[in-house]
Image: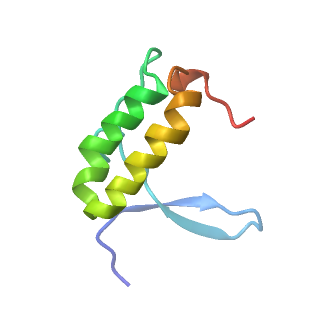
Amino acid sequence: MQTTQPKRLLPSLLGERAYAPRPRSDVAEGRPVMNDRLTVAEYLNRWLYEVAKQRTRPMTWRGYEHLVRLHILPTLGRVRLAKLTPQ
């Protein structure tokens, strides 16, 4: 079966061969290039207006904007993305 996207081999946990797409660059995927000073607020606002607004329906976008504005930004807005950890 022929695919249009090049693939590369990755070892799986079971030792079998698994295929996965090659990673794409942040710029090609529409993600901002990370810098040490970018905050959660700057990132989410850029994502809301440059990505989500174009790719979602109006009511979906309004829901995202509402959640970001009322729940995420008051708590995490000033935190730099480079300082975020999963914990």
Name above or below for residue 11 compared with residue 64: below
Q: What's the image's color scheme?
A: rainbow
Where is the C terminus found, in terms of image quarters?
top right
Near-viewer residue (50 or 75): 75
- Residue 77 horizontal/vertical position (percent): 50, 26
Name above or below for residue 81 compared with residue 46: above
Where is the N terminus found, in terms of image quarters?
bottom left
- Residue 42 horizontal/vertical position (percent): 38, 27
Near-viewer residue (73 or 30): 73
Q: Residue at x 50, y 32 (%)?
A: 73
Q: Residue at x 69, y 70 (%)?
A: 16
Name above or below for residue 58 compared with residue 3: above
Which image quarter: residue 71? top right
Q: Residue at x 40, y 32 (%)?
A: 43
Near-viewer residue (1 or 72): 72
Q: Residue at x 31, y 51 (%)?
A: 52
Judged left or right of residue 53, residue 71 is right
Near-viewer residue (25 or 87): 87
- Residue 63 horizontal/vertical position (percent): 40, 56
Which image quarter: residue 30? top left
Which image quarter: residue 50? top left
- Residue 5 horizontal/vertical position (percent): 33, 65
Q: Residue 28, can we see it?
A: no
Name above or below for residue 24 compared with residue 57: above
